[in-house]
Image (spheres, coloured by chain):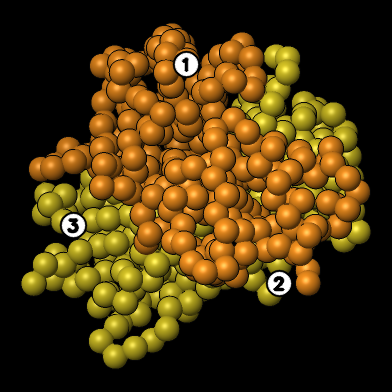
Chain colours: A yellow, B orange
């Protein structure tokens, strides 16, 4: 009886964005491990144990999954989006590196998923259609000074940007500071897009400019996309299309 | 009879990474449009016309798709990976913006897919598990000076990096220059990972360091991932795990 750990991404919410690979792993599992709202997306069935855990206990959750695999269980650790983008995959490998030698020998696989920024981009058009960067705005696990430095350098590089975890109740002020920094580095007309609960029935996309953006436009269910200097908005009846062209004609 | 255009991502190659949403659009289509190797991934069936086109005719392909939709056809434009990451979605919106007013009124949707860098990251562990950027190394559509500037700023920001289109027969020298720039900005031990033909039977992952990397390790089927200064390699029997930790304890 060989156990394994699969770290699988469930995508941003819609069933239509769960890959067949992730679904097959769930169907073959004996145990599902993850943050409460993600585990609740898994249909219960005989022979499958669902282990819900709270936020901010990623290392305990990883150790639990790895321990069960050494006991022969087939464990799927579920993340929303892609498990490798600000989600459980790094936590699993941190636990492996710090843990007993037996964990290194385990069959551990990561299955990619549709990450929120790409679902948000698709819902709006193609705002990440050129070079871009992806920054976690939470300063739970890194100093704010590093976030600020990355924001300034990303603006200087004229990357489009995607922000995860822009704002939470425990960190209400960080996103306002982010907007202030971007306003120092970018023109007021720069496109900024708030994508909330992408691909779910609650989906809401708001397209605006840096000059008009306010901190309250983001919450923890929001991914924020900022265009490069070349990002365009195509006005039309209904929601506009937002895209970043493929070409840059002069070093900008 | 209302036509539509769906721009769908087929993922990096494996059937298990095609989303149900993309498959449903293909099943509902009357016409498939795309670059030859991507259209060849679609199973022929009665009532479905496959339109293959060559590389570097993205604007003509976009206009063709939009024109067919105005005639009531249900058109899926296929890209590999995610259509919004260096693929057809931006070309479609460029065509819409430059085209006749009727195109703006069309039902145009982008469906996200598993992009190569995230499939490559998953195959290796979690090298993009912290802030990262994504750069197209082709200078077909932008000046090399801009690529060089972005590389230097990305290194200064200590982003992990993903590179698309690192090297082609027509641009054999660009990737060597990229390695030279990174060696100026990063330590020799910096982790670099070459992921070729990810998720296909030809998949090959090579993990090495900047000091050991050579231009020949990349070709047009390769995605290159460069770690941040904190990226770790866990040695083990078989392929190592590569991951970037979630935490940064000091402004680095």
Identified at 16% across, 56% down, the residue is: A106
A170 up-or-down from A161: above or below:
below
Q: Going by the image, does B192 lie left or right of A30?
A: right
Which of the two marks, 1 or 2, is nearer to us in this view? 1
Distance from the alpha carbon under mark 1 to that under mark 2: 47 Å
Q: Which residue is mark 1?
A: B170
Residue extending farthest to the bottom is A46
What residue is at 54 percent from the left and 45 percent from the top?
A: B52
- Residue drawn at point x = 85 percent, y = 52 percent: B104
- From where the camera sits, is residue A223 visible? no
Res B105 → quadrant: bottom right
Q: Please state the horizontal and vertical placement of residue A147, each as a whole percent of the image.
A: 60, 35
Q: Tell me, yes or no, whether dots 1 and 3 are on the same chain.
A: no
Instruction: Name the residue: 31% across, 69% down.
Output: A25
Give the Cα separation between the discs numbered 1 and 3: 41 Å
Query: Residue A224 versus residue A151: which sits nearer the camera?
Result: A224
Please rate how many residues cluster around mark 2, counting C-alpha atoms within 10 Å: few if below 14, some from 14 to 19, many from 20. few
SS category of the residue bearing label 1: loop
Marks 1 and 2: same chain? no
For label 3, the residue is A107
Pick whichever, B162 or B235, lies toward us.
Answer: B162
Give the secondary structure at mark 3. Answer: strand
- C-alpha distance separating marks 3 and 2: 37 Å
């Amino acid at each position: 009886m060989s156990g394994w750990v699969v770290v699988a991404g469930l995508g941003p919410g819609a069933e239509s964005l769960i890959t067949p690979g992730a679904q097959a792993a769930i169907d073959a599992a004996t145990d599902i491990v993850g943050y409460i709202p993600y585990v609740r997306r898994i249909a219960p069935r005989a022979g499958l144990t669902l282990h819900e855990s709270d936020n901010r206990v990623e290392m305990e959750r990883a150790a639990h999954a790895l321990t069960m695999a050494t006991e022969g269980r087939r464990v799927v650790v579920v993340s929303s989006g892609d498990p490798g983008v600000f989600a459980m995959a790094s936590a699993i490998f941190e636990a492996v590196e710090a843990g007993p030698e037996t964990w290194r020998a385990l069959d551990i696989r990561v299955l990619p998923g549709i990450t929120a920024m790409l679902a948000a981009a698709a819902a709006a058009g193609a705002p990440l259609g050129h070079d871009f960067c992806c920054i976690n705005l939470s300063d739970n696990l890194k100093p704010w000074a590093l976030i600020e430095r990355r924001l300034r350098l990303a603006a200087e590089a004229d990357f489009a940007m995607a922000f995860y975890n822009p704002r939470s109740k425990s960190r209400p002020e960080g996103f306002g500071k982010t907007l202030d920094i971007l306003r120092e580095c970018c023109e007021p007309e720069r496109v900024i897009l708030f994508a909330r609960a992408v691909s779910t029935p609650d989906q809401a996309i708001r397209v605006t400019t840096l000059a008009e953006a306010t901190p309250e436009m983001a919450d923890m269910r929001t991914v924020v996309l900022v265009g490069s200097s070349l990002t365009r908005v195509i006005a039309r009846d209904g929601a506009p299309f937002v895209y970043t062209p493929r070409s840059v004609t002069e070093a900008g």
